[in-house]
Amino acid sequence: MRVGRVVGKVTLNRAHPSLRGAILKLVVPLSLDNLLGKLPAQAEELVIYDETSSQEGCYLAFSEGREAAQPFEEPKPIDAYAAAILDHIEVRPLPDRPAR
């Protein structure tokens, strides 16, 4: 599971029959450094299948690969699936570990 921020939506003029009526969002994946505010988000955007009704600016938890197809009875040609809208994200840095 990864975290990303919605930056837009995707509109298709042609789609696979199993994607008719689907809502697709454009999401920037966020790293731990992005969430801690150390770096601005610079990753390449992903297209994510979204059933959460998220809006631009929302943070999502999403899965990729084989896990992205698990929520569906019929197979769908998708690579990423929005699992949840994140209302609040709290990230605490791990304490420094002593050297071994």
Image (tube, grey):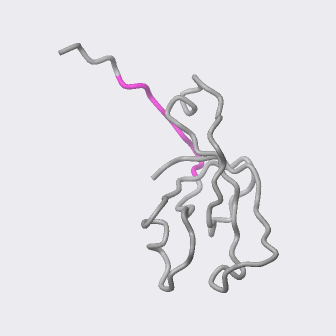
Indicate whether 20 appears above or below 30. below
Task: Spot the residue most to the right.
Answer: 13
In this view, the residue farthest toward the top is 99
In this view, the residue in front, 6 or 92, is 6
The residue positioned 66% from the left and 79% from the top of the image is 19
Q: Quadrant of residue 96?
A: top left
Query: Secondary structure of the magenta portion, mostly?
Result: loop
Which residue is found at the position 57% from the left and 69% from the top?
Answer: 78
What x and y, as percent, mark residue 66?
43, 67
Find out whether residue 21 is within the magenta segment.
Answer: no
Q: Position of residue 82 (x, y in %)?
A: 57, 61
- Vertical placement of residue 82 versus 91, above or below: below
- Residue 34, given in percent of the width and then of the height, sits at 57, 32
Residue appearing at x 72%, y 80% in the figure: 21
Chain part drawn in magenta: 86-94
How many numbered badges does the structure rendering display?
Answer: 0
- In this rendering, position of residue 98 left or right of residue 70: left
Q: Is residue 91 above or below residue 28?
A: above
The quarter of the rendered structure image containing the C terminus is top left
> Is 94 left, or right, of 53 in this rendering?
left
Does 60 sit left or right of 73 as displayed? right
Instruction: Between residue 71 and residue 64, name the one nearer to us.
Output: 64
Residue 8 found in image quarter = bottom right
Q: Position of residue 75 (x, y in %)?
A: 50, 81
